[in-house]
Amino acid sequence: MNNYQLMITADDKQVVLERILQVTRYRGFLISGMNAKVNTGTNVGTIELMVRSERPIELLVDQINKLIDIKEVKVDNSASQQCIA
Amino acid sequence: MTTEKKLTGASLLFNVLEQHGVAHVFGYPGGAIMPIYDALYDSDVEHFLCRHEQGAAFSAVGYARASGKVGVCFATSGPGATNLITGLADALADSIPVVAITGQVATAAMGSDAFQEIDIFGLSLACTKHSFQVTDINDLASVLHQAFAIALEGRQGPVLVDIPKDIQITEVNGCLDELVNLQNKVKLPPANVGSAIALLNQAKQPILYVGGGVGMANAIDELRDFAKITGLPSVSTLKGLGAIDPEDKYYLGMLGMHGTKAANIAVQECDLLIAVGARFDDRVTGKLNEFAPNAKVIHFDIDTAEINKRRIVDASILGDLKVNLPALAIPLAIEAWKKVCLQMNEDFAWDYNHPGESIFAPAVLKEISDKMPENSCVTTDVGQHQMWAAQHMVFDDPSNFLTSAGMGTMGFGIPAAVGAQVSRPTDCIIAVSGDGSFMMNVQELSTIKRFQLPVKIVLIDNAKLGMVRQWQDLFFNGRLSETDLADNPDFIMLANAFDIKAQMITKKSEVSAAIEEMLEHDGPYLLQVKIDAQENVWPLVPPNTANDKMMEST
């Protein structure tokens, strides 16, 4: 099981946070933590997402990137780590 | 362009639809969408009343797939909206551009568990490419433009726009914004053409693996040129059928669970697999880690997320197939391999010799395929008849074979045929169905009657849920559970009740005349073809098995 931290920047549109959470769950990643700033009136939402999975993180990054309102998804390698499950 | 003329939100919707060239919509009215249906009264858009919202969604899908245009469907709030969901999920799985408009309770009532209120916006997240809920009338035109742009850009898909009732009746300046032309927001990396060309040149036994993305990209000509110039033997997915020239003698047919023996063996033996608009679906690959085990892979796609999703590739070519296929079209020195493929095509050709007087469904479908007029469009439901149609009918364009591939939705065929017939009124539209699937959206016979659509229905009837029965026989020790449909209605009487001419045949000797009568009939027609309930679809790759370990009989 690997831990990853994603830094997501999005157009601050309707339900963008729900969309990210739905895709994350459906694609086989457990959410272990989150820090989100959305609906701030700045038109930009920022979401830090901590996830766990046995699947490669690229699969999730690609799927989140497909969401219409997403501007950028970065994997924070310094905060991501492999753990012995 | 903003005009001074005041319009209601509902009227503005039709202005935008007409701006996008929408001439036909499929739908069903109800309380929360009544202002839109009132505005329809004054619109030039032609509305096709379906008899269930699922039928409306599938008709929109069939319309889109047969015409290449966006399909549009309407439903009211609550149950109307939830009834659309299966159709939207089907469109998402097969990447079909559909815009669904749902009425919603008034914004003041939202979140109060109002009558016919459901959070369709929330429900839409898993079954649409994108969705909107309009809560400000000033956003309506922009949202609708975006909906059409998103449905069509990149990998196509369904978009839902939920419009509360008060937004539908609020007045706004008539707004005919410029059409939105979305730039592909995902910046694609440069195509890895150099390494792909090297792989092509090194390959001794390459295979072209063609998926539904070719038709969606409108890249049929580019694909056929690519196949011709390279000389590549080819195989097709279910949704890719029709993309390769059916006269191409190196075309080996469909691969996968019910693929041809030649296609599956060739893929298993190939040393290079060139996937074009295909996604390594589990019904294609069988046991994934034994799929094309010796092959390197070049993957052409518009969707970055499909690269390395199920199979790690050696070169990815992202972007428009119309541009990228010609860039890699080089002659290849693979004559020995082409001869092997040609020989397999001969050795493993279909055998239509079938003992006895009972009707052999593959032969019926082949005969229909041989006799149907040029540019006919065939829809199917899901099950044994679907696989027989895929195996034994010949299509010269993917828009002439509409089948629920990714979602595998029973009940797709009849409403999809309605949509196809509306979009192509002069073409012959044939719905191949099974007795299980037919009953799932049988109410759409009423839509056929209402609009006098000359859809031909071929009902392959074994009084069983045939594919499930086949699997129960093969993999569940013959324990037949809930697959017997001996209590089916009288299908001839049922068709006649909708003013549809119908005939039942039970013997081989009746087949040819019945097909001719059906095809020559001016209006809608139902041909019920009784077959032996024990007939199976062959070949069959058992679950979690490599594709070359197929079963060919019991």
Image (cartoon, coloured by chain):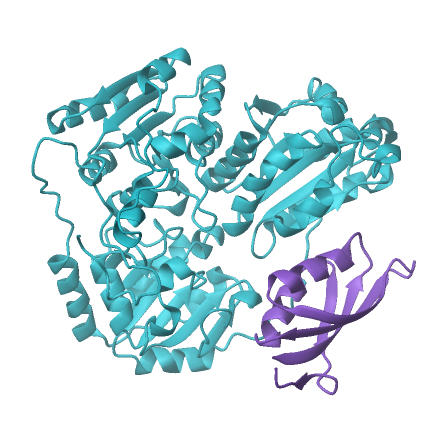
Chain colours: A purple, B cyan
Number of residue marks = 0
Residue positioned 36% across, 56% down in the render: B237
In the picture, measured across the screen, residue B416 lies left or right of residue A59, that is left
Q: Position of residue A68 (x, y in %)?
A: 69, 57
In the picture, measured across the screen, residue B434 lies left or right of residue B56, that is left
Q: Which quadrant holds residue B132?
A: top right
* Most foreground residue, B171 or B223: B171
Q: Which quadrant holds residue A12?
A: bottom right
In the picture, measured across the screen, residue B531 lies left or right of residue B2, that is left
Image vertical order of residue B430 relative to residue B229, above or below: above
Residue positioned 48% across, 24% down in the render: B444
Q: Position of residue B173 (x, y in %)?
A: 87, 32
Q: Position of residue B481 (x, y in %)?
A: 35, 41
Quadrant of the snapshot with the N terminus of chain B: top right
Residue positioned 17% across, 27% down in the render: B511
* Most foreground residue, B75 or B355: B355
> Is residue B131 in view from this perspective?
yes
Residue positioned 80% across, 55% down in the render: A13
